[in-house]
Image: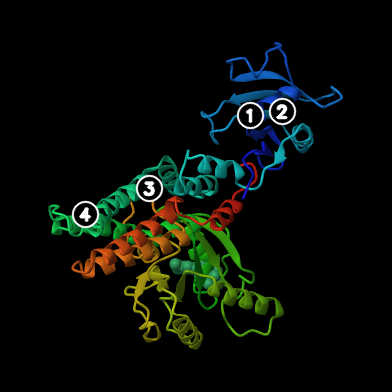
Amino acid sequence: MTNFEDTIAAISTPPGEGGVGIVRLSGKSALAISAQLFRSSREKDICTSSQQVFHGHIVNAAEETLDEVLLHVMRAPHSYTREDVIEINCHGGAAPLNAVLEAVLTAGARLAAPGEFTQRAFLNGRIDLVQAEAVIDQIRARTRAGLQAANAAASGTLSQRLHAISDQLAYALAHIEAAVDFPEDDLPELVTPELFEHVRAAYDQMRHMLATADAGRLCREGAVLAIVGRPNVGKSSLFNALLRDTRAIVSKHAGTTRDRIEEYITLSGIPVKLIDTAGLRQTDNEVERIGVALAREALENANMILFVLDAAAPAEEEDVCLAQELAELTLPTVVVLNKADLVDVCVSPACCASFADTVSISALTGDGLKKLEDILVGHLLGGVNLDAGQAMLNRLHQKESLRRSIESVERLLDDTTLSPEFLALELRDALHALGEITGETTPEDILDKIFSTFCIGK
Ligand code: GDP
């Protein structure tokens, strides 16, 4: 657990060269430490001036100028952490940033741990845990849709929905607890069917949240699609077509894709890593054999497989063997009958009967590509319809807590005639589990673990 008395500092911009780099400070002494090192070009005192941005220089203890800077003052509680925050905009290179950071640390600040600024924002009550985790999603978003969802969560929409659920459960709990406390009193009946309507409404909303949690996680973490098939069926052509670019070598000679080629595409807002594998065939060629081994490894990490076949040629023994191998993996597999432009009718071979989806395409003309993409999105999202930018729970620990909360509510709804003591217990457990998502009841060690995954300076 971090010490709140400390004033913390870190370089908040990424390493490397840039126009500007920022050293950020937060804490009780942020202003005093900065004032020690800052020489304003207009001789302003940053501690007393109402101004927020100052131009000047940072000097060390020997009064040597370290860098020309712009200094931003954000006074508590109107800052990211709700503490006094100073941001020193230096020149964006390693030497000026390190020199300024060192001066700040020498003057009394402590180097911030990863995520410590955000952790303070959370512990000072400016944001809850859902919003804090959304901040890191904003930074790491790989698609526009991912950023929109993170923005929505960071602004508190998801937290509001969770609080609305908690409020319904807490309302029911208050009545049930009163029934426990005053069983003999002449109170109007407290535990009424109407009360359970509140619980049921909360339950329905929780189920909906749970149903979208996997999709949320996928949008954040991304999916891996492996393109598999025997040589020359058009895997590289399909890879390029999905990429809308020429990245993989297309050749009529079998075995041209010997390494594993990876690129990112976006499908309906989901970041997807596309892997063009070497054909999975038996080969004596050493280089190709390494490619085949890499292809097998790719399959182990894939969310889905595109099994490509040549629609214009009868299935070969290699296709059949591959179909068997893929069927054993039990990963969602879409059979792609490529080169549809060469035949009148595409027929899926018997060896592919066990796979749920088949789509005919021509990687050459682009026909069928849209349908293939729709099938992939449908599979990846598990049939969940996403509104663009919808905020969803997107972490395993959130889903786990929600699931436990739902289980408690389910036990209660299963038999509402049970003793008020029992009903209250279930509701308390449900509320506690929900509180783990928003951070109210999250154990300290888990909080530390969550924030330690953040970047330094955030
Ligand atoms: P890979 O070995 O499976 O990666 O196959 P390639 O993508 O290198 O393609 C092998 C050959 O099939 C090349 O000559 C491609 O131009 C050709 N090809 C790929 N897709 C199609 C298609 O949809 N229609 C036609 N007519 N030819 C294709």
Q: Residue at x 67, y 23 (%)?
A: 70
Q: Is residue 74 above or below residue 349?
A: above
The residue where tag 1 is placed is 86
Does 135 sit left or right of 4 as displayed?
left
The residue where tag 4 is placed is 198
| Amino acid type indicated by mark 2 | Ile
**Mark 2 and mark 1: span between their CA atoms?**
10 Å
**Mark 2 or mark 3, which is nearer the start of the sequence?**
2
Residue 166 is situated, as x and y percent measured from the top left of the image, at 32, 51
Q: Are marks 2 and 4 in contact (CB under 8 Å)?
A: no
Q: Secondary structure at mark 4?
A: helix
Question: 385 or 203: nearer the eye?
Answer: 203
Q: Is residue 278 above or below residue 93?
A: below
**Mark 1 and mark 3: span between their CA atoms?**
30 Å
Residue 289 is situated, as x and y percent measured from the top left of the image, at 66, 79
The residue where tag 2 is placed is 33
Q: Are marks 4 and 1 in contact (CB under 8 Å)?
A: no
| Amino acid type indicated by mark 3 | Leu
On residue 158, the disc is 3
Q: Residue at x 64, y 72 (%)?
A: 258
Question: 45 or 176: nearer the eye?
Answer: 176
**Mark 2 and mark 4: span between their CA atoms?**
53 Å
Q: Secondary structure at mark 1?
A: strand
Nearer mark to the viewer, of 3 and 2: 2
**Mark 1 or mark 4, which is nearer the start of the sequence?**
1
**Mark 1 or mark 2, which is nearer the start of the sequence?**
2
